Amino acid sequence: MMEISAASIGESLHDIDTPALILDLDAFERNCERLRQALAGTPINIRPHAKSHKCPEIARRQIAMGAVGICCQKVSEAQAFIEAGIQDVLISNQVVGTKKIERLCTLAKRARVSVCVDHLDNARALHDAAVAAGIRLPVLLEIDVGAHRCGVAPGAPALALAQAIKGLAGLQFKGLQAYHGGAQHLRTHDERRLAITEAVRLTRETRDLLSEHGIVCEKIAGAGTGSFLLEASSKLYSELQVGSYVFMDVDYARNDQTGSGMPEFEHSLFVLTTVMSLSGVTHAVVDAGLKASSVDSGLPVIAQRPGVHYVRASDEHGVLRIDSTIAEPLRLGQKLRLIPGHCDPTVNLYDELVALRGEHVEALWPISARGALL
């Protein structure tokens, strides 16, 4: 199969084929530095979530700036990063099924790999596979702190599962996974603060209960781009799993950060698209539709073009509505930057990131974990 790339190194932005996933390197680097500065002087480790970018080069840069490793959600995702040389990976998710668990144990022989668990049957399956592989597999006990997705109930149910894990020779109990995903996109700071305050209470009480029974939590992990300073200020969390901060997207930008003290992360990720059809002065079509940008969190927004609105998407087309009052009409063949509604699934649509310095292509970074669902 012929390999097709949207760009070449040194090429101008205006020569990039579209649709293409582009990264503003200056904005990306400022985002990384703002996160580092926000947590400077604290004992908290950063373990960025690589499901946002799926790109080993970004992971390498995050680790070079002090991250202790990365998070992944899937075994195949972890494999892509380990094969690229990343040596410390937490699968912040449950791994269920014989084939997946066997692959997990194989990876754990090559790198520092840990995984989350929230059910005794899964813990036993992990133990059996680890013993067969001749390893001890580090695990975090995931508790439900308000997202109502994965996680055993805090308190006594978590204690019972932790005690069972401690009795399984193939596993190493490392601590708690306490991530409140639902809090990340609560729009006001007060809403997020209330949600995380409750999550911290549940996590602290569970940690203390385990301690009373002789079970030490070396690590308490969680947090995300929308709330990480709240978890950090609790003095409870030891690892923060921020992900989208490197890119930002339309949905995260809707969060009101007034009074939060959060860093001002910039949009650095865009879908470059071309105006492919014009009909009058108020209607245009671009070549980036549903196959180019995820719309699960809303339609993309056109960057730096007030008065031009992305209003409808089909498979290969994006329909634009243009205010009649705009000063500069669009032209056929014109390139526009779309800010994705949700960065994570948008990245998963592409094989490469076109990394730009100003208006020129500096690098092409493979999105090696794209499509890693197993």
Image (spheres, rainbow, N blue to C red):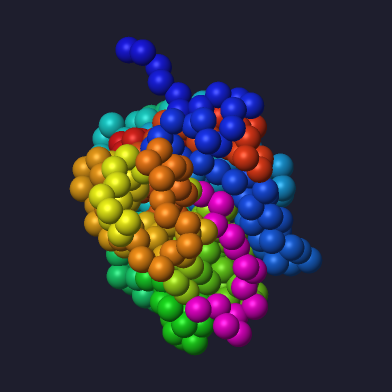
Percent coordinates x, y for residue 62 in the rendering: 64, 46
Question: Residue at coordinates 38% horizontally, 47% vertically from top-left?
Answer: 346
- Label the magenta part by its dominant secondary structure: loop
Q: Name above or below for residue 243 compared with residue 194.
A: above
Question: Residue at coordinates 64% horizontally, 52% vertically from top-left?
Answer: 27
Percent coordinates x, y for residue 357 in the rendering: 66, 40
User: Is 313 placed left or right of 362 in the picture?
Assistant: left
Looking at this view, is 115 or 224 the one in front? 224
Q: Name above or below for residue 233 compared with residue 125.
A: below
User: Is 223 placed left or right of 28 in the picture?
Assistant: left
Tell me which corner region of the image, top left, top right, bottom left or bottom right, holds residue 156.
bottom left
Q: In this view of the protein, can residue 120 be seen by the observer? A: no
User: Is 34 placed left or right of 188 in the picture?
Assistant: right
Looking at this view, is 197 or 96 the one in front? 197
Percent coordinates x, y for residue 86 in the rendering: 58, 34
Q: Which residues are magenta?
A: 256-269
Quadrant that contains the N terminus: top left
Quadrant that contains the C terminus: top left
Question: Residue at coordinates 51% horizontally, 41% vertically from top-left?
Answer: 22
Q: In this view of the protein, can residue 42 be seen by the observer? A: yes
Looking at this view, is 57 or 207 the one in front? 57
